[in-house]
Image (cartoon, rainbow, N blue to C red):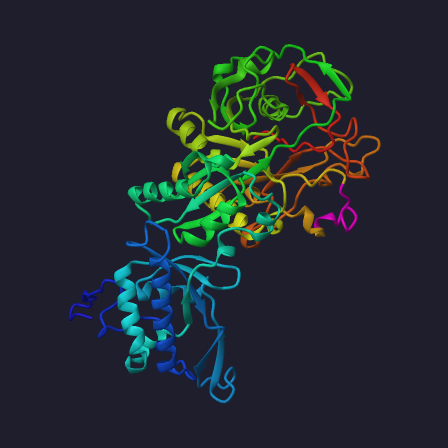
């Protein structure tokens, strides 16, 4: 303190690793006292592993190898620390498991290494420049002569390795592919690559593909995070070759597709009357990301604010799911169980038709979500609310690890986009598979892992909408109004966050968890008629 009682400013100097100078003291306690480590042996092993990795990368066909080293840091399973805490320490020692995903992630920043990802086995996918590898290799050789502070940075690292192919591509998926037959695949490139390096990498990948087998790249794109990717027709042999030889490829996987519920055959429907007159231009607008609505729809065309068609969407007839969802966005939840009412519903919103269909009917192209949102936010500032009534077919935990990581990367992009652009996104909690009975009967059906949420419904910054039974009909499994719809997927979300955030009427189901007439909710068909008989459509309006 100064004589006048004010705090005297103090200057701290940082080095190129954003660390305090060696003479400065960091807050947060003293340097950990790691013991039972042969630092000479550890340093030699780390230095040799770095040399092996550098040699393998230099011998690879990866065109980015002169500027980037992507590799794996294998952790020490357990550390031993000296401690005087008599309640925790035995013989003056405490044990600590290495966790690169949490408290030990800081060691890479202190070493000047970029941490990119932590694999399921605890290994860390890292990146460093060639000159940084030279520095680290040299320091590791003399690790036994360095001080405790410098040694503590290396305590959690056992060795460095090449990234194994199984961290780039799911082996189970490869085994399902037919030899020398092309399949739809997405190749995701590592972050931190410059545009010129991506171009060189794409050319190197193209050289591997065989035209006589029909292999080719068919599209490219950039995620919200800036990471770039290409899509194409590729054989399993080429996928294996790319996964083994290109460290700058982060992952290879089948297209990321979500499912829009396909309606069963219509069992009961009624003609729609013309809606009550309302000034459509005065209504709020909700963006509906789905499978599209026919341009000449007899009822909904009047309430269309605009249309966006993703480049990957088929140009043919729209899938029924998009019109059904949009009708509930516009008209809410009408009850036509006793026939069309004398007074048709009054519209409460308009919709922006955002068609992000996949190649097959009822599919949603997950990679198309960000470009669609970006386009609408930039060109239609009055659209601030978006509806996504779809999700991955399988619960998140059952998706293979590589594809699960890529799917969660898109969910993370959505969260960041929502925050950056101050928009509201409502996502349906999703439906269980038709006709599958839970291992534990309703109402404890949520204990069955097949009722767990998919990926999109776990988004942090969106609102996840579940469903309940509003109207009780004959033959329904749920007999109490207000109880959860038996097919609705249940949380928690990521990091055990509470999900769903709210609920709307979604209909009932049979005791066999199947469709039945009179148990569902109402919506418009492509032909402009009200349809019911769906026991499991989760399309609450925003």
Residue 101 part of the magenta-drawn span? no
Rendered residue at 51%/82% (across/down): 88
Q: Nearer the viewer, residue 22 or 367?
A: 367
Q: Quick check: 90 left or right of 481?
A: left
Q: Is residue 460 visible?
A: no
Q: Quick check: 239 left or right of 465?
A: left
Q: Quadrant of residue 334?
A: top right
Residue 383 in picture, x, y percent from top left: 45, 27
Rendered residue at 75%/26% (across/down): 533
Rendered residue at 48%/37% (across/down): 215
Q: Quick check: 530 left or right of 123?
A: right
Q: Is residue 487 above or below residue 191?
A: above
SS assignment for the magenta stretch, majority = loop
Residue stretch rendered in magenta on the structure: 436-446
Q: Nearer the viewer, residue 120 or 211?
A: 211
Residue 444 part of the magenta-drawn span? yes
Residue 316 in picture, x, y percent from top left: 56, 19
Residue 28 in picture, x, y percent from top left: 35, 71
Rendered residue at 67%/29% (across/down): 262
Q: Is residue 184 above or below residue 530?
A: below
Q: Quick check: 189 left or right of 411?
A: left
Question: In what quadrant of the picture does the N terminus appear?
Answer: bottom left
């Amino acid at each position: 303190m100064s004589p006048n009682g004010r705090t005297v400013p103090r200057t701290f100097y940082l080095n190129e690793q954003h660390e305090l100078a060696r003479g400065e003291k960091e807050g947060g306690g003293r340097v950990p006292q790691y013991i039972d480590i042969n630092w000479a042996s550890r340093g030699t092993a780390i230095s040799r592993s770095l040399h092996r990795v550098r040699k393998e990368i230099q011998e690879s066909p990866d065109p980015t190898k002169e500027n980037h080293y992507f590799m794996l840091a294998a952790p020490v399973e357990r550390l031993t620390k000296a401690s005087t805490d008599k309640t925790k320490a035995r013989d003056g020692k405490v044990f600590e498991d290495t966790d690169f995903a949490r408290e030990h992630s800081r060691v890479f920043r202190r070493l000047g290494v970029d941490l990119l990802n932590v694999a399921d086995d605890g290994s860390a996918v890292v990146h460093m420049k060639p000159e940084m590898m030279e520095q680290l290799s040299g320091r590791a050789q003399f690790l036994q002569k360095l001080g405790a502070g410098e040694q503590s940075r290396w305590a959690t690292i056992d060795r460095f390795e090449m990234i194994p192919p199984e961290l780039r591509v799911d082996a189970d998926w490869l085994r399902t592919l037919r030899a020398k037959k092309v399949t739809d695949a997405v190749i995701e490139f590592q972050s931190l690559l410059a545009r010129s390096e991506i171009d060189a990498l794409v050319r190197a990948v193209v050289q591997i593909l065989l035209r006589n087998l029909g292999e080719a790249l068919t599209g490219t794109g950039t995620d919200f995070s800036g990471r770039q990717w290409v899509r194409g027709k590729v054989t399993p042999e080429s996928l294996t070759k790319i996964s083994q030889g290109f460290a700058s490829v982060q992952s290879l996987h089948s297209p990321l597709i979500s499912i829009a519920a396909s309606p069963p055959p219509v069992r009961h429907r009624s003609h729609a009357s013309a809606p009550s007159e309302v000034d459509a231009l005065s209504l709020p607008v909700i963006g509906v990301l789905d499978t599209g609505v026919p341009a000449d729809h007899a009822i909904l065309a009047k309430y269309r604010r605009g249309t966006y068609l993703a480049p990957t969407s088929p140009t043919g007839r729209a899938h029924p799911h998009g019109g059904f969802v949009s009708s509930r966005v516009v008209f809410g939840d009408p009850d036509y169980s006793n026939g069309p009412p004398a007074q048709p519903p009054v519209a409460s919103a308009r919709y922006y038709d955002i068609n992000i269909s996949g190649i097959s009917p009822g599919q949603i192209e997950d990679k198309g979500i960000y470009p669609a949102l970006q386009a609408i936010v930039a060109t239609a500032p009055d659209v601030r609310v978006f509806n996504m009534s779809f999700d991955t077919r399988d619960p998140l935990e059952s998706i293979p690890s590589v594809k699960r990581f890529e799917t969660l990367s898109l969910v993370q992009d959505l969260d960041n986009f929502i925050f950056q652009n101050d928009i509201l996104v409502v996502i349906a909690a999703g439906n269980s598979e038709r006709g599958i009975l839970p291992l534990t009967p309703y109402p404890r059906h949520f204990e069955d892992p097949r009722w767990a949420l998919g990926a999109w419904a776990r988004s942090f910054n969106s609102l996840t909408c579940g469903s309940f039974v509003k109207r009780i009909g004959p033959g329904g499994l749920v007999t109490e109004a207000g109880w959860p719809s038996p097919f609705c997927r249940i949380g928690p979300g990521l990091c055990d966050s509470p999900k769903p955030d709210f609920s709307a009427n979604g209909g009932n189901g049979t005791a066999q968890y199947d469709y039945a007439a009179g148990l569902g909710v109402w919506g418009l068909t492509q032909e402009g008629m009200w349809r019911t008989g769906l026991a499991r459509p989760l399309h609450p309006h925003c």
